Image: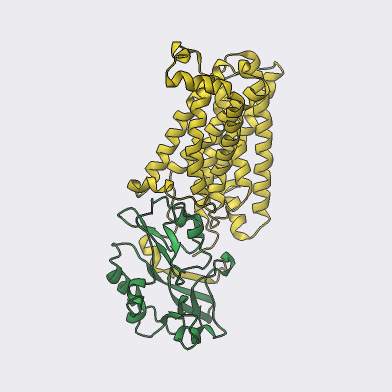
Chain colours: A yellow, B green
C-alpha cells in the first residue's frame, strides 16, 4: 500500500477486518477429503491395472477406511457451519458456478461408490458367509464383484474430482491472493494422492506392494513439488498483494511451518528416504509416510490461514 | 429498474449517523455493522487530502458472493440489489471469503448478514435509513434507469468511481468526489 495513505474505518471496531473467516475445521476437512481421494484413486488404479487379486490386504483396509475418514471430514465441515440446522440446504440446490455446491454433490456421490468397492474388495476380517447369502447384501456384493472394473473407474473419477475440488474450493473465492491460482486444484490433487499412497504404506505389510507404493509416492511428491514451484513462481511475479502472500509462506510468519515441515519435512525428506529404501540403503520405515501425512495436513493449514492473512483488495 | 446508491464523498462529514440509523432500522446486533465510515488521508504534510466515505455491501452486478454461494441463499433480487435468503443460508461463509469488500458478517443467529439497501423501505417508496438520516444529503438512492433521478444526475459526473474496480464486480454502489 502507498505509505502516504492512512485509512481508518469504523468497521475495524467490529473486528471485521483481519478476522479469520475459516478456522481449523476447513484444513482438517481439506486434508481428510484429499486423503480419501488419494486412497480411492490408489486402490482403484491397482485394481484396474494389476487386477483385483493384486489388491493387498493393506489396500483393502485402506479402502475400508475411506467412508470413515470422509465422514470425519464432513463432520469437521458440519462443525464449521454457523447455521447447522440448514445443512440440508446444500442438497436442495445445484450451482455449477459454486465449487462448494458441486463439492457437496461429489461428497454424496462417492459414498455409494466407496461402499460398493468395499463390498467387492473387503479386508479379510469382513469375509464371511454373508457374502454368499441370498439377501440384499449378498446380491449387492455379487453385483459389485461383477462390475468391479466400472466401479473402479467411477472410484478413480470420483477420487480425482474430490481431490481437485478441495483446491478449487479455495481458488474460486477470488478475494485472497494466495488462493487465486488455478494451481491449487492440481496441488491439492497431487498432495491428496501422495497422502493416500502414504496412508497405504503405513498399513501395508507386503514387501512388493510397499516398493510399488514407495515408487508411486516419489512420483507424486515430484509432481507436487513442480506444482508448488509453479504456484509460488506465479505469485512472486504478480502484484504486491501476491508477492506479500508468497512472502508470508516463504520467509514470513508461516515460513517455518511451510518451508520446514511442508517442503522439507513433508516432501523432500520423505522422497529422499523412500529413494534410499528402494535402493536398499535404508529400511522402509513407517516414519516416512507419517512425515508425508503430516506435511499434507500442514500444507492445508498454512494455505487456509496464510491465505486469509493477506487480502487481495485491502479494505 | 436498477437500484443504485451514489455517495457524494465531498458532502460526507463522517458523522456516522448512517451507521447508527442502519443499526436501528435493521436491528443490527451489538458490535456488528452493515455500513461503516472510512477516512482516507493521502499525501505528505502540508499537501494532505482527506476523503470520508460511508461504505457497505456494493450490491455488485457480478457478485462473487452470489457465484460462490452453494445454496442460492445469496442472490440477485432483480432490482440491482444482492440479497440473502436466510432460509437457504447454511453459514458456510464462502460468500465472506469471496467478498472483496469485507461487507459481510455472521449474525449471532448463524446466518450471514449484510446491507440489504433497505429494500423493505424502498419497496414502500421510502429512502434507505442511511439516506434519510444523512444530514448533508451525501447519500442518494434511486433508479439508474431513470435519467431524471438524482442518482442518474450524479452518475453523469466525471468524478464517479467505484471501490476496488480491479475486482471487476460492477458495483451498484458508487462514489463521486
Q: Is residue B131 left or right of residue A242?
A: left
Quarter of the rendering occupied by the N terminus of chain A: bottom right
Residue extending furthest toward the front: A134
Q: In front here: A312 or A160?
A: A160
Name above or below for residue B66 compared with residue A182.
Answer: below
Q: Residue at x 45, y 10 (%)?
A: A129
**Image quadrant of residue B125?**
bottom left
The reply to whether residue A156 is visible in this rendering is: yes
Q: Residue at x 57, y 64 (%)?
A: B167
Q: Is residue B17 left or right of residue A186?
A: left
The reply to whether residue A266 is visible in this rendering is: no
Residue extending furthest toward the right: A279
Q: Residue at x 39, y 81 (%)?
A: B13
Q: Position of residue B154 (x, y in %)?
A: 49, 85
Name above or below for residue A181 compared with residue A221.
Answer: below
Q: Position of residue A9 (x, y in %)?
A: 42, 68
Q: In front here: B91 or A282?
A: B91
Q: Position of residue A186 (x, y in %)?
A: 63, 42
Q: In front here: B102 or A263?
A: B102
Residue extending furthest toward the top: A129
Q: Position of residue B148 (x, y in %)?
A: 47, 89
Name above or below for residue A286 compared with residue B101.
Answer: above
Residue extending furthest toward the bottom: B148
Q: Is residue B109 left or right of residue A162?
A: left
Q: Residue at x 46, y 56 (%)?
A: B95
Amino acid at each position: 500500500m502507498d505509505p502516504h495513505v492512512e485509512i481508518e474505518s469504523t468497521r475495524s471496531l467490529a473486528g471485521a477486518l483481519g478476522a479469520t473467516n475459516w478456522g481449523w475445521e476447513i484444513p482438517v476437512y481439506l486434508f481428510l477429503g484429499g486423503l480419501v481421494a488419494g486412497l480411492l484413486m490408489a486402490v482403484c488404479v491397482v485394481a484396474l491395472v494389476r487386477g483385483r487379486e493384486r489388491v493387498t490386504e493393506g489396500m483393502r483396509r485402506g479402502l475400508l477406511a475411506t467412508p470413515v475418514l470422509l465422514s470425519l471430514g464432513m463432520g469437521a465441515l458440519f462443525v464449521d457451519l454457523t447455521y447447522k440446522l440448514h445443512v440440508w440446504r446444500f442438497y436442495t440446490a445445484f450451482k455449477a458456478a459454486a465449487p462448494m455446491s458441486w463439492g457437496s454433490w461429489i461428497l454424496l456421490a462417492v459414498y455409494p461408490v466407496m461402499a460398493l468397492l468395499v463390498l467387492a474388495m473387503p479386508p479379510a476380517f469382513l469375509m464371511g458367509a454373508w457374502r454368499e447369502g441370498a439377501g440384499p447384501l449378498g446380491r449387492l456384493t455379487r453385483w459389485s464383484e461383477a462390475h468391479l472394473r466400472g466401479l473402479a473407474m467411477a472410484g478413480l473419477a470420483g477420487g480425482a474430482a474430490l481431490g481437485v475440488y478441495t483446491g478449487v474450493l479455495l481458488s474460486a473465492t477470488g478475494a485472497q491472493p494466495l488462493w487465486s491460482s488455478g494451481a491449487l486444484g492440481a496441488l491439492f490433487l497431487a498432495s491428496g494422492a501422495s497422502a493416500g499412497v502414504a496412508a497405504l504404506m503405513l498399513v501395508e505389510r507386503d514387501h512388493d506392494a510397499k516398493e510399488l507404493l514407495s515408487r508411486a509416492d516419489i512420483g507424486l511428491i515430484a509432481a507436487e513439488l513442480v506444482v508448488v514451484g509453479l504456484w509460488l513462481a506465479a505469485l512472486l511475479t504478480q502484484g504486491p498483494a501476491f508477492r506479500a502472500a508468497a512472502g508470508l509462506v516463504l520467509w514470513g510468519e508461516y515460513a517455518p511451518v511451510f518451508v520446514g515441515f511442508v517442503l522439507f519435512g513433508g516432501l523432500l525428506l520423505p522422497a529422499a528416504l523412500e529413494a534410499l529404501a528402494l535402493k536398499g540403503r535404508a529400511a522402509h520405515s513407517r516414519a516416512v509416510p507419517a512425515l508425508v501425512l503430516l506435511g499434507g495436513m500442514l500444507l492445508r493449514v498454512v494455505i487456509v490461514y496464510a491465505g486469509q492473512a493477506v487480502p487481495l483488495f485491502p479494505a | 429498474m436498477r437500484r443504485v446508491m451514489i455517495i457524494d464523498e465531498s458532502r460526507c462529514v463522517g458523522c456516522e449517523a448512517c451507521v447508527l440509523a442502519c443499526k436501528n432500522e435493521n436491528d443490527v446486533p451489538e458490535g456488528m455493522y452493515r455500513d461503516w465510515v472510512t477516512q482516507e488521508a493521502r499525501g505528505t504534510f502540508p499537501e494532505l487530502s482527506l476523503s470520508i466515505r460511508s461504505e457497505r455491501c456494493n450490491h455488485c452486478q457480478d457478485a462473487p458472493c452470489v457465484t460462490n454461494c452453494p445454496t442460492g441463499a445469496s442472490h440477485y433480487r432483480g432490482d440491482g440489489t444482492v440479497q440473502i435468503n436466510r432460509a437457504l443460508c447454511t453459514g458456510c461463509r464462502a460468500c465472506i471469503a469471496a467478498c472483496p469488500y469485507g461487507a459481510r458478517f455472521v449474525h449471532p443467529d448463524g446466518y450471514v448478514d449484510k446491507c440489504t439497501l433497505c429494500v423493505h423501505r424502498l419497496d414502500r417508496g421510502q429512502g434507505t435509513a442511511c439516506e434519510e438520516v444523512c444530514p448533508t444529503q451525501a447519500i442518494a438512492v434511486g433508479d439508474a434507469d431513470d435519467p431524471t433521478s438524482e442518482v442518474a444526475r450524479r452518475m453523469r459526473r466525471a468524478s464517479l468511481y467505484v471501490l476496488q474496480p480491479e475486482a471487476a464486480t460492477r458495483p451498484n454502489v458508487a462514489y463521486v468526489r
